[in-house]
Image (cartoon, rainbow, N blue to C red):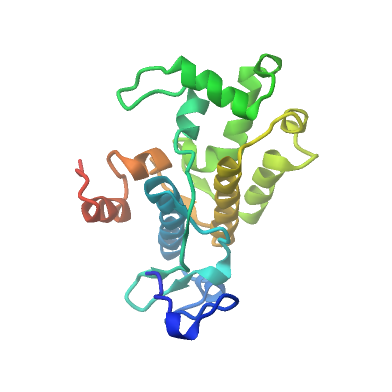
Amino acid sequence: MIPDVIPSLSHERMMVSEYVHGTGFEELKHRDQPERDRIGEMIFRFYFGCLYRHGQFSGDPHPGNSMLLDDGRMAFPGLRTVQADAARGRRARDRGRPRDHRGRHRPDHAARDRRRVFSDPDKFNPDRVLAHFRAATSWYTCDREVTLTPEYATQVMIDMSDPRSEYFGYLRQESAPPDHIFGRRMEVLTLAVIAQLHATRQLPPDRPRVVLRGSPSTELGREEAAFYGQPVV
């Protein structure tokens, strides 16, 4: 649920939205495990689904921007539009070689995309680039059950951009385009919120790839797929 903006009460320095009543995040942190898992999945589906499905994003995922309504829905603030880098996972899995919608390699696009991030791609070890990708994204890309905690989120943040990261030597030589940075910021902030719930992500995960197309693995996933008219297997 996204509250409506009230234009008559808003101006360029203040936005007034519809009033929403619900349970705040601090109280949600003390709910039982199944409910925290469900809330964590809703948070994941909202932020990742909006970005990878609709090309929109919330630039400020944090606990104060989510609220559980009495009917079981989650309320979130409005979104902005951005060009999502939806092929990121495909490129990483194939070491920089994106595929078209039929699964065919597109080497010309792969070379272009590598040059966008790596000014001199030949200086980068593909295995290390893939290892860095996995360190930063395994919480939602790997087929395993994982409980997300603040300590886990902290390590992911270190691996993504901190000088303490073992990958920092590569990070200093990368030049990520703005749309890529928007997406990565959204990812790590979403992880930080879910981690406060100590939520467990069940197997198999509904990754951004599956959010866009594919068979969902959870009740919420099947409800979402039905809403968007996707086939549910």
Q: Quadrant of the N terminus?
A: bottom left
The one nearer the camera, 79 or 23, is 79
- Residue at 64% over, 55% down: 150
In this rendering, position of residue 56 left or right of residue 175: left
The one nearer the camera, 108 or 203, is 108
Please tell me whether residue 200 is drawn above or below residue 162 in the rendered image: below
In this rendering, position of residue 222 left or right of residue 125: left
- Residue at 30% over, 40% down: 213
Q: Quadrant of residue 104?
A: top left
- Residue 65 visible, this orientation: yes
Residue 138's spot in the image, x, y percent? 54, 38
In this rendering, position of residue 168 left or right of residue 205: right
Q: Quadrant of the C terminus?
A: top left
Please tell me whether residue 28 is drawn above or below residue 113 in the rendered image: below
Please tell me whether residue 158 is drawn above or below residue 175 in the rendered image: below
- Residue 207 visible, this orientation: no
Residue 152's spot in the image, x, y percent? 63, 48
**Residue extending furthest right?**
163
Residue 20's spot in the image, x, y percent? 43, 81
Please tell me whether residue 213 is drawn above or below residue 151 in the rendered image: above
Residue 81's spot in the image, x, y percent? 46, 54
The one nearer the camera, 35 or 110, is 110
- Residue at 68% over, 33% down: 175
Q: Quadrant of residue 59?
A: bottom right
| Total count of labels | 0
